Image: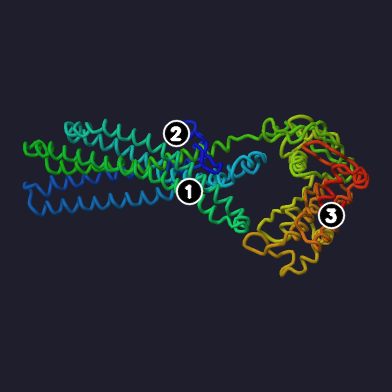
Amino acid sequence: MHNDYGYFEDEQLGQINDLRLWRRVAQFVRPQWRWVLLSVLLSSIITVTSLALPRIVQLAMDRHILSTQTDIEERLAGITALAGAFLIAILIGFIANFLQVLALEWAGQNAMHDMRQSLFSHVVELDLGFFHARPVGRLVTRLTNDIQNMHEMFTSVIVTLFNDGVRVVGILGILFWMNWSLALILSATFPVMVVITLWFGRLSRDAFREIRSRLAGINAYIQEAITGISIIQLFLRAGDTLARFRELNDRYFKATFTQIRIFAVFIPLIEVMNALALALIVWYGGGQILRDRMTLGELTAFIAYMRLFFQPLRELSQKYSIVQSAMASAERIFQILETQRTLALPEAPSRPGEVRGEIAFEGITFEYEPARPVLKELSFHVHPGETLAIVGATGSGKTTIINLLERFYDPGQGSIRLDGRDLRDLDLHWIREQIGLVMQDVFIIPGTIRENILLDRPVGGEELERIVQLSQLGEVVKELPEGLDTRIGEGAMDLSSGQKQLLAFARVLARDPRVLVLDEATANVDTETEMLIEQAIQSTLAHRTNIVIAHRLSTIRRADRILVMDHGRIAEQGTHESLMARQGLYYHLQTLQNGVV
């Protein structure tokens, strides 16, 4: 089922009778089995106390209120004793209910905590291609709404259904024990109830499919709109954005209202069946009383038990909706948990002790989409300690080279080697420790400057001070109110684009990788900040193998060699001077940028 604007939910919807899903859910619930068992035991107490109440009323009516065979004092004493038993049963049921809620919430919160932790831990380890194929809003829905749906089902439904099942069986046993002929009349309504319930289940399942799909679309659209709010305001697209959201919101509203209409039919039908059963019981039971075959207390108790019998059926709509929604959520959650890495990890990954920094791309062909290659039989070699610049028009494959070098993706053909070893044979975490990356967009974690530089690395105070000075971040830190302990990021102080770039260089120096990749690191900064960044780059590039993707001439001139990319192939390579003298593609790119010939 597809939504507008490219958002969609998977076609498969979790089924209530899907044993595979229930087994997966049980894996998270099993560690809480003691609390679940306690809830079941408390459920039995709740059921017994609730079923005892109509019986106590019957005894009071037949033996004391309507009886004329004993004196008034004796009857009053009997009523008082039964009233006390009634209150004790209510009190025991209340305490058992209270304890059951606590046990269920404790077990449910722990189970969902583990599920949320497992899901997030799995998601952050997935390959980059997984995130490129899915809107962020959908993943947020999995970690929030879907987990909450599972929690609601566990705490509100599972043990409650057990309560209702025991109660229904108990009521049927009591009714047949009290009056089997009247119980058979009540049982005549069961086939109709089964038909109504199956019909409701089919319609509500389709309604929930639509609701989950529409909600995921809304979440994804909100996330993209908030992320791009500056563009929306700059290009005066608020009206169009609002119109698109209104359409998504209206479709979600209509899907939800469809579900409400289904419930609006189902609940009155249950009430009609309840009223029909009551009428049959009063008609038949009243006749039995007139014939002295049944007491008024028995009929009263029978009616009370009948109402208790229909109560779970009246609540079935709500419970079914919770379970169906939770099963849909479970299907989505476990689809993500079952998503495997596309990158093949070696069984015995290698972690070389010494890294020289020699890089070789050998016959690399790569495509994000079938039959649309981004790189075509690309081969080049970077010597240890060499600085290689890569330039080219947008779409020429520069960023893809970085993605392959960091092993976010594997090439379709060819191999990438670090010091002669294929990246596919090396430990993935080790690769990313050795190959540092400074990007144009710097991610800031909510925390202090110190925490953003170190990222939990054990670096001493003197070494940190040296890193701050080499990255040209010293003057910035001096101007901050609390120096390195100034909080930045969401909900705190923000840094300029240039200051973030300096922070990114400080991070790299703290990691001290043998290979460094700069991706448009000076693209969006002013001239003064660029001078600081240039000094930081000189400090950072020293004694490393470097690959620099940049458009600015000052950055490119520093390179020992320049590769010029064009449609996934190397069009030219050489030093800045030799390429300018050749007056080919590189010369054309530089003249376009600088406006000179």
Residue 514 visible in the displayed image: no
Q: Which numbered disc flags the more N-terminal residue, 1 or 3? A: 1
Q: Is residue 5 above or below residue 15?
A: below
The amino acid beneath tag 1 is: Glu
Label 3 sits on residue: 537
Q: CA distance from mark 1 to mark 3?
A: 49 Å
- Looking at the rendered image, the disc whose residue lies closer to the viewer, 3 or 2, is 3
Label 2 sits on residue: 15
Q: CA distance from mark 3 to mark 2?
A: 57 Å
SS class, disc 1? helix
Q: Which numbered disc flags the more N-terminal residue, 2 or 1? A: 2
Q: Are marks 1 and 3 in contact (CB under 8 Å)?
A: no
The amino acid beneath tag 3 is: Ile
Q: CA distance from mark 2 to mark 1?
A: 29 Å
SS class, disc 3? helix
Q: Nearer the viewer, residue 3 or 295?
A: 3
The amino acid beneath tag 2 is: Gln
- Looking at the rendered image, the disc whose residue lies closer to the viewer, 1 or 3, is 1
The colour scheme used to paint the residues is rainbow
Q: Is residue 382 above or below residue 18?
A: below
Q: Is residue 553 above or below residue 359?
A: below
Q: Position of residue 167 (x, y in %)?
A: 30, 39
- Looking at the rendered image, the disc whose residue lies closer to the viewer, 2 or 1, is 1
Residue 339, picture quadrant: top right
Left or right position of 431 against 133 = right
Q: What's the mark number on residue 247?
A: 1
SS class, disc 2? loop
Q: Position of residue 356 (x, y in %)?
A: 88, 41
